[in-house]
Amino acid sequence: MPERNLRLGVPSKGRLAEQAVALLQQAGLNFRRQERSLFARAREIPVDITFLRADDIPVLCAEGAIDMGITGSDLVAEHGVDVVTRLALGLGRCRLSLCVPEDRDFQSLQELDGCRVATSFPNLTAAFLRQHRADPHLVSITGSVEIMVALGVADAVVDLVETGSTLAANRLRILEDIGQYETVLIQSTSCRDTALADRIVRRLQGVVIARSYSLLEYNVARARLPEAEKITPGFHSPTVSSLEDCDWCAVRVMVRQSEVIQVMERLESIGATAILETAISNCRL
Ligand code: PRP
């Protein structure tokens, strides 16, 4: 028996915090957080949720202070820590970009030599600039990077871009992308209960897959089933059932949500009828 509950680090505030808590609850990790408390014990599973700064989670996980954590892959990369990334959570997709003022005519990274670049990602930025043989002066700060140009602290910034609205509001444009990142579940190499960690991964995986797939059901003429199966090959393979009219059959299959509309149109074009999309809230495949 492990001597203590498994510790799972979760961001304590910001966009990531709300999304992470919603994901955990959908995966059956239910807990109640007392106001301002840093701990919450999950019901029916020996897991303690620890609320931490997203920025600290990679380091605390690498040090073994928490067994698992939810954080950004950008922060894992920035800290260069030795942790195992168990699962991409389908949240917080963003890119880290080098951005310059809209009204400055920078065309290449090398033109930034001698300029000041503000960022809260000094390690990733320095490695990127080295790789491209550019040599600006780095100004390392911990937040509100986007306003550093307006404040006269920097000529360019390296910051996360999700929708691009922060850039637009600050009259900045992307000169170069440094990398693409998203929210991930990480595990310490010294995790004390790997069987329980695997169980948490499976639970979260069920929700992550369910969120990105829909269940599609339709009827199609048996003669056109091979074509239908090409359009909807399914996760493993579609479920095909008989109908009273033996020239027809019913198909049930998982389809990527981003492709559902297109798939429905293609099924219609081969004569499929009664095409229904149902959301999946959880699954085990
Ligand atoms: C991040 C990032 C940008 C913003 C980009 O900040 O630092 O400021 O999001 O998103 P957008 O392209 O959709 O505008 P976040 O809100 O996560 O908070 P932070 O300033 O604490 O990093």
Image: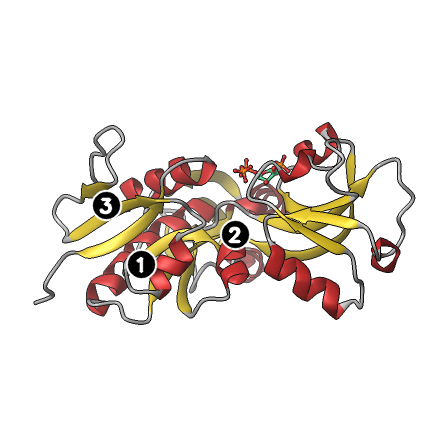
Q: Residue at x 34, y 45 (%)?
A: 52
Furthest toward the left, the residue is 1
- Image height check: is 42 above or below 230? above
Q: Amino acid at mark 3?
A: Leu
Whichever of labels 3 and 1 marks the residue nearer the N terminus, that label is 3
Distance from disc 3 to disc 1, alpha carbons, whole Å, reads 14 Å
Q: Secondary structure at mark 1?
A: strand
Q: Amino acid at mark 1?
A: Met
Quarter of the rendering occupied by the C terminus:
bottom left
| Viewer-side residue, 25 vs 102 | 102
- Image height check: is 144 above or below 220? above
Q: Which residue is mark 2?
A: 182
| Viewer-side residue, 151 vs 30 | 151
Q: Secondary structure at mark 2?
A: loop
Residue 147, position as x, y percentages in the image: 68, 33
Quarter of the rendering occupied by the N terminus:
bottom left
Q: Amino acid at mark 2?
A: Glu
Q: Residue at x 78, y 56 (%)?
A: 136
- Mark carried by residue 68: 1
Q: Secondary structure at mark 3?
A: loop
Q: Which residue is mark 3?
A: 29
Whether disc 2's CB lies below 8 Å from ligand 1 is answered no
